[in-house]
Image (cartoon, helix red, strand yellow):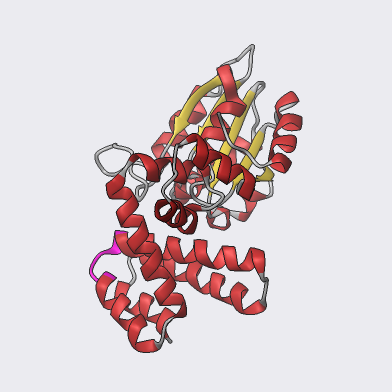
Amino acid sequence: MIYIHPTTKRRLDILSSELPQSLLLRGEPGVGLLTIAKQLAGDDLALILRPENAKGVFDQQGTIAVEKIRDLYDQTRSKHTKPYIVIIDDANKMSAGAQAAFLKLLEEPATNIHFLLLSHTPERLLPTIRSRVQHLVILPISQAQTDSLLADLSITDKTKRTQLLFIASGLPAEIIRLTRDEDYFSTRAVLMGDGRQLLQANAYEKLLVVNKYQSDRTTAIELIDSMLLIARRSMSTKPSTTIIKQLDLLLDIQANIAAGYNVRLQLARCAL
């Protein structure tokens, strides 16, 4: 069973009857973008592009190279008599060259070709791409749906349930992964705890967290992901200009770390 917020489900039902040429699905990490995209594509799914490392292996910290988009351009130029749906997972991980090449695909649409772009940070896509695709926000599932999912997963231990709700309330794909991988669960619990400390503790305690993550770029990015999740939850329950500024700062820090800036100096901005 796929858990989808009722409002999102209604929008998806409408879109599935007449799929746009290009659709951007956006939402929080763990909300299940890829699962939903696969369901939307159904039997017409032709290809999934995902970020890769230098060895050509899927890697969430990798990129989608321009060569992949050039190959996609060639693949979609032939005639298709039925829908040919391409999913681009973590579309914001397309390199600058790949995004420019993809823009050409959008500007020269071919018959029966459909693109489903998935992104947790769509602001990192070119404005010209964002303006040419239809957008759909995939909402976190409701508390009742989260409770139902936990029941389906046979999570009865109160402590475990509380931890799962703290880490991934409303995020069905993340909850499922956490329950299936204890090592991942332990890692995420630490990241969320440290993320909360870096957001809410005093300056000294914040610097302790900075020192802990200063030498590991990948884990530092994961820490910022956790902080973004906490900040977005706060924004949904009690919106404020302070939280908006905090979100903007975190996105800037995350982008800078990914771009190779000094990790310690970037994380230290959270402690100022």
Image spot of residue 256 (x, y percent): 41, 68
Q: Is residue 139 visible?
A: no
Question: Looking at the image, is 88 positioned above or below residue 60?
Answer: above
Q: Residue furthest top?
A: 81
- Decide if residue 68 is on the left or right side of residue 46: left
Give the magenta-colored segment's residue range: 213-218
The residue under the point 33% across, 38% down is 58
Q: Is residue 83 above or below residue 15?
A: above
Q: Residue 60's x, y, as percent?
A: 37, 47
Q: Nearer the viewer, residue 45 or 149?
A: 149
Q: Is residue 7 magenta?
A: no
- Residue beneath the point at 25% across and 73% down: 212
Where residue 142 sits in the image (x, y, percent)?
64, 48
Q: How many marks?
A: 0
Residue 20 shows in this picture: yes
Location of the C terminus (image quadrant): bottom left
Where residue 134 appears, as percent x and y from the top left, is: 70, 42
Name the residue located 63 percent from the left edge and 45 percent from the top edge. 144
Q: Nearer the viewer, residue 43 or 227?
A: 227
Position of 32 compared to 196: left or right?
right
Viewer-proximal residue among 263 and 229: 229
Classify the position of the N terminus by image quarter. Answer: top right
In the figure, 52 relative to 84: above or below? below
Where is residue 202, by image quadrant?
Answer: bottom left
